[in-house]
Amino acid sequence: MKRLRFAALLLVFALMLAGTVHAQTDLLVNTAQVQLWPEYDQPAMLVIYTLELADTQPLPADVTVRIPASVGDPMAVAVLEDTGLVTRQYTRTVDGEWAEITLESDLPVIQIEYYDSALSQADPQRSYDFTWSADFAVDNFVFSVKQPVNAVDFSVIPSLGTGQTDSDGLMTYSASFGSLAANQSFQLSLSYTKNDTTLATESFVLNSGTTTSEPATVGSLPWWGWVLMVLGVVLLAGGVVFYIRSTKQPAPSKYKARKKRNAAASKPAASRTSTSRTAGKPAGQGTVFCHQCGAQAQAGDQFCRECGTRLRG
């Protein structure tokens, strides 16, 4: 009886173990990309895994990725959200030369990063060997390598084709190797010569230092933007001038006032006497003339239309 119970327990345990292995083996990975960035921001090799699960993969899914045990804990374990990469909790289990990083992913894109000090800056001749190992299949395996700053005689085996300058200004080599079966390994080796310890990020700072003194906004507007801005300034200035002129009371013209006085002085005496008798009379009691310049006022006027002088009541 005890033997039967023990056999039953072993069967249950075997089924549970098989189910776990089956779940990882059946993980549907559309694309797995490995990026190697030697001497980028640390004197080591930055390794980046990016997994894109298939659209048919049920989520959440338990994902286990192998990294060398010698590198210790990964620098980042994250998933890609709409706002960018967001870290996730993970477990690390060492199995021989490998460490298994396991996380539960609720999103289809996973990224794991770590630094490998196996790349050394001790000698000008530098090399690095990489091995990929996973217990799940990959439909499309992509590999890319950045060439370090000031590196010469750069070589990658197998070849990644012709390099292209990336957004960092570094030459990057990339190639797709098609599908990989579960537990199928992939090896890549690179070597180069570098006579200094300058990191890529240090080079970025040195190069940007020659341009940061220039204002970032100079020349940023297109030509039509400058035209609209100038037109707006002209219209604003015109509006201000029009407002000032419309609210300012016209000042008496000294020239006109002097001309009227001269004209009044040249009139015959009788005419001037008549004018002096009627000047200053209010509207409605006869013709009114300005006592300052002699101009004839109209009915209801309180100020002279020529010189602006207040008419006498």
Image (tube, rainbow, N blue to C red):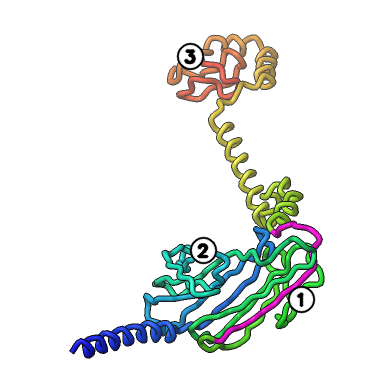
Q: Nearer the viewer, residue 238 or 180?
A: 180
User: Which-is-in-front pick, marks 1 and 2?
Assistant: 2
User: Which-is-in-front pick, marks 3 and 1?
Assistant: 1
Judged left or right of residue 166, residue 18 is left
Asked if the residue at tag 2 contacts the one at tag 3, i.e. Cβ–Cβ closer than 8 Å, the answer is no
Report the residue marked by disc 1: 155
Instruction: Inspect the magenta stretch and tell me whether residue 105 lies in it.
Output: no
Vertical arrangement, residue 232 with respect to residue 119, above or below: above
Among numbered discs 3 and 1, the one appearing first in the sequence: 1
Vertical arrangement, residue 6 with respect to residue 208, above or below: below
Q: Secondary structure at mark 3?
A: loop
Vertical arrangement, residue 223 with respect to residue 185, above or below: above
Residue density around tag 1, few if under 14, some if 14–19, many if 20 or more, within 10 Å:
some
Q: Nearer the viewer, residue 253 or 294?
A: 253
| Residue 132 found in image quarter | bottom right
Q: Position of residue 299 (x, y in %)?
A: 47, 24
Question: Magenta stretch?
Answer: 184-200
Residue 117 seen in render:
yes
Q: Nearer the viewer, residue 294 or 28?
A: 28
Among numbered discs 1 and 2, the one appearing first in the sequence: 2
Vertical arrangement, residue 89 with respect to residue 231, above or below: below
| Numbered mark located on residue 281 in the image | 3
Amino acid residing under circle 1:
Ser
Report the residue marked by disc 2: 73
Q: Quadrant of the N terminus?
A: bottom left
Q: Secondary structure at mark 2?
A: loop
